Amino acid sequence: MPKTLRLHTLSQDEAILRAPNIELTFPLSKDVLELIEDMKVTVKKAPGIGLAAPQVGANLMLAIIHLEEFGIEAFALINPKVISRSIKKTAMEEGCLSIPKVFGQVKRPAKVEVTGYTQEGRKVHIKGGKLLAKVLQHEIDHLNGILIADKFEK
Ligand SMILES: [Zn+2]
C-alpha cells in the first residue's frame, strides 16, 4: 500500500532541498515506482498541486503534477526540462509544501514547453499555460534546488 511521506521543509531540511538531483534511467526500479505511488498519495493528502522528489527526501529528477480539480489525473514527470518560455511573464500567488503557511507573488513566464518522460519511459512534450505553466516551473525549480522564497517579488 502506498504511504504518506514526510514533507521536508526549508527550515529543517534545506541541504536536501538544495542538493543536486540525479536523472533517472529506464526502466525505473521497483523502489522508484514505489516512491512515485507514495508521492501521489502524499501530494493528494497535503493537499498540493505538485510535489518534487527532494521535498520527500529523494534527490531524483522526478516530480508529481496533481491537477485533478482541473481534469488532469496525477502524473509523474521524470527528467523534465523547460525547452521554451513565453516572453510574457505573469505574477501569481504561490505557496509550497516545503514552506508551510507562506505565500508570495512569483513572476514567471506565462507559458512554457516542457519535455520529460512518463513513469513508463514514454517521452512527453507538454505545452502549458496558466496554472499548469506555473506548477511545471515551480516543480522544475525544485529539481534545480530553487524555492519560491528565492523568487518572491519584493
Ligand atoms: Zn514547492
Image: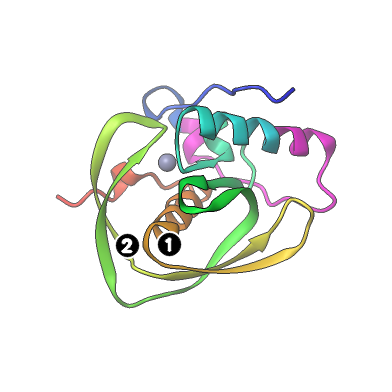
Residue 35 in percent (x, y) is at: 70, 33
Q: Which residue is mark 1?
A: 133
Q: Where in the figure is residue 26, as x and y percent of width and height? A: 82, 53
Judged from this view, the residue extending furthest toward the left is 154
On the image, the x and y values in percent for residue 86 come to: 37, 76
Q: Is residue 18 highlighted in magenta?
A: yes
* Element type at mark 1: helix
Q: Say whether residue 145 is left or right of residue 92.
A: right
Amino acid type, mark 1 = Ala
**Residue at x-position 36% and y-position 25%:** 11
Q: In the picture provided, is 102 more to the left or to the right than 24?
A: left
Residue found 37% across the figure and 63% down from its top: 130
Q: Is residue 30 above or below residue 3?
A: below
Residue 90 drawn at (x, y percent) = 26, 65
Q: Report if the CB atoms under discs 1 and 2 are less than 8 Å apart.
A: yes
Q: Which residues are magenta?
A: 15-35
Residue under numbered circle 2: 108
What residue is at 85 percent from the left and 51 percent from the top?
27
17, 44: nearer the viewer = 44
Specify which label sits upstream in the sequence, 1 or 2: 2
Q: Judge by depth and name the residue closer to the eye, 132 or 123.
A: 132
Q: Secondary structure at mark 2?
A: strand
Quarter placement of the N terminus: top right
Counting labels gives: 2
Q: Is residue 127 above or below residue 98?
A: below
| Of labels 1 and 2, the one closer to you | 1
The quarter of the picture showing ligand 1: top left
From what the image shows, is residue 95 above or below residue 56? below
